[in-house]
């Protein structure tokens, strides 16, 4: 079967590469010529474990190609997957202009029955509206079916998540389209992945509700952690005991400086906006956003207390990406913390294994020095902040770190170190909720 994936961003690229690895013939299309040329040369536009290796293998086996010719790619494929961006617009609602442009191309290019699979995260009701929009713009009324098939990929483990998902959600009114989508995911049957076949509306809601629920879980444990600090309890003992209750589950109960990234903040805001628009307020989601924003301020206040003021203090910051194993800094709590520290006249020495180039674009100007490695970042600092839990920081030589620092104060927002061990080495150590 021939599949065309429109959009070579995170979702499109992982999906295209994954389906080619499942044995399908995939063309990934993008209007960005530079991006396509780079992909044709085998250059990766994103950092994602395993992506490059599978991509190169599939290109070599002629199952995967890259193109800017959208019309031909649409006409040659039986299934067209829409994975263009839906960035947040100025009003907090997703900007659907890229999806609308794709709808125009679909309307003018389709000459025989196609299955259109929407993978981009879209506001509630968009799949059906898109169906109507394409129909309205079609000069010749060629039949097509539209499906909403959300992705649940996590950055850093996206390939693994694609190959071994917890579930596949198919939102469609068409039996034929459902059959075709099940067919493209056939290898997942073998590993007994549950398939949920439902309406497009329910599928759209599943995506927003999943992300909002996970963001709520993180926010809950962050607030519990803040309280644990006041009473001298270790939040990890609390989270572990909570997680053993099967009704709660142990995942996403790790405290930190707040959730970030390209999905959680945007999707929770989109749910809040949908609730306002449809007069069904999503109050819990609203408060989750407020608490999450305040979490980085709580961290900055903690650093301020630990260093007895921030003015002209030199602070090492390890980790800039919103989480490990990615160079993505979108809504990164680390960058929010760095900005607030600089506003308070601190001088930052920052290091991240891969996210420095992206961070430079956001944290340009005075106050931040980007370092070549973690040891440079801690040299002569008044305090050290662990902002992202990269594995290389877990294995850092702590004796060396202590000898390089001016004052051995560590604020570990991700709890990557053991408090007792840190104290034994001679650090003044502040964890998150312990
Ligand atoms: C998320 C969803 O997990 C994924 O299903 C969806 O498709 C896209 O959004 P991602 O943004 O890649 O994926 O990252 P994730 O691993 O979910 O972490 C999101 C944020 O929550 C990060 O800032 C992370 O540090 C934070 N987090 C996560 C915590 O603070 N504590 C936790 O226990 C888990």
Image (cartoon, grey):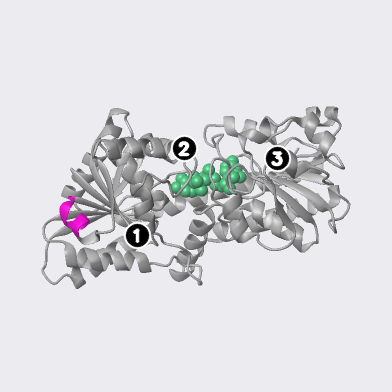
Q: Earlier in the sequence, mark 3 or mark 2?
A: 2
Which type of secondary structure does the marked residue at label 2 adopt?
loop
Q: Which is in the foreground here, disc 3 or disc 2?
A: 3
Residue shown at 47% from the left, 43% from the top? 154
The image shows residue 203, relative to residue 345, as above or below, that is: above
Q: Position of residue 303 (x, y in %)?
A: 80, 50
The span picked out in magenta is 72-78
Residue shown at 56% from the left, 57% from the top? 284
Q: CA distance from mark 2 to mark 1?
A: 24 Å
Which type of secondary structure does the marked residue at label 1 adopt?
helix
Q: Is residue 384 left or right of residue 132?
A: right
Q: Is residue 289 left or right of residue 36?
A: right
Residue 104 painted magenta: no
313 or 115, nearer to the observer:
313
Residue 74 painted magenta: yes
Label for residue 49? 2
The image shows residue 249, relative to residue 118, as above or below, that is: above
Label for residue 340? none
Q: Which is in the foreground here, disc 3 or disc 1?
A: 1
Q: CA distance from mark 3 to mark 2?
A: 22 Å
Q: CA distance from mark 3 to mark 1?
A: 37 Å
Residue shown at 33% from the left, 42% from the top? 17
Q: Position of residue 371 (x, y in %)?
A: 69, 47
Label for residue 374? 3
């Amino acid at each position: 079967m021939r599949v065309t994936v429109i959009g070579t961003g995170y979702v499109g690229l992982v999906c295209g590469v994954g389906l080619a690895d499942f044995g399908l013939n995939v063309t990934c299309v993008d209007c960005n010529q530079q991006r396509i040329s780079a992909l044709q040369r085998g250059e990766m536009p994103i950092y994602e474990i395993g992506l490059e290796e599978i991509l190169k293998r599939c290109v070599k086996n002629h199952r995967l190609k890259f193109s800017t010719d959208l019309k031909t790619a649409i006409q040659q494929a039986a299934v067209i997957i829409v994975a263009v961006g839906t960035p947040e617009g100025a009003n907090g609602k997703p900007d659907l202009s890229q999806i609308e442009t794709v709808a125009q191309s679909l309307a003018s290019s389709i000459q025989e029955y196609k299955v259109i699979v929407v993978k981009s995260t879209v506001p509630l009701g968009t799949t059906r509206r898109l169906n109507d929009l394409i129909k309205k713009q079609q000069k010749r009324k060629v039949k097509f079916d539209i499906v909403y098939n959300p992705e649940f990929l996590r950055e850093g483990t996206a390939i693994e998540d694609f190959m071994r998902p917890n579930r596949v959600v198919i939102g469609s009114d068409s039996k034929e389209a459902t059959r075709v989508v099940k067919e493209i995911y056939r290898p997942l049957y073998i590993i007994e992945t549950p398939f949920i076949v439902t309406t497009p509306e329910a599928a759209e809601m599943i995506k927003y509700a999943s992300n909002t629920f996970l963001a709520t879980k993180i926010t809950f444990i962050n607030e519990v952690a803040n309280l644990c600090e006041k009473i001298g309890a270790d939040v990890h003992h609390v989270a572990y005991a909570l997680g053993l209750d099967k009704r709660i589950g142990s995942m996403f109960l790790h405290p930190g400086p707040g959730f970030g990234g390209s999905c959680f903040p945007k999707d929770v805001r989109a749910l809040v906006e949908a609730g306002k628009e449809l007069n069904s307020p999503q109050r819990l989601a609203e408060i989750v956003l407020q608490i999450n924003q305040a979490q980085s301020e709580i961290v900055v206040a903690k650093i301020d207390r630990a260093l007895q003021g921030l003015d002209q203090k030199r602070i090492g910051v390890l980790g800039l990406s919103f989480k490990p194993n990615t160079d993505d800094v979108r809504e990164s709590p680390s960058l929010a913390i760095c900005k607030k520290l600089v506003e308070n006249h601190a001088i930052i020495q920052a290091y991240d294994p891969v996210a420095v180039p992206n961070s430079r674009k956001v944290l340009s100007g005075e106050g931040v020095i980007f370092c070549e490695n973690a040891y440079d970042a801690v040299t002569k600092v008044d305090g050290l902040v662990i902002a992202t839990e990269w594995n290389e920081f877990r294995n850092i030589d702590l004796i060396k770190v202590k000898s390089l620092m001016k004052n051995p104060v560590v604020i570990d927002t991700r709890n990557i170190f053991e408090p007792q061990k840190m104290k034994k080495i001679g650090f003044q150590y502040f964890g998150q909720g312990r």
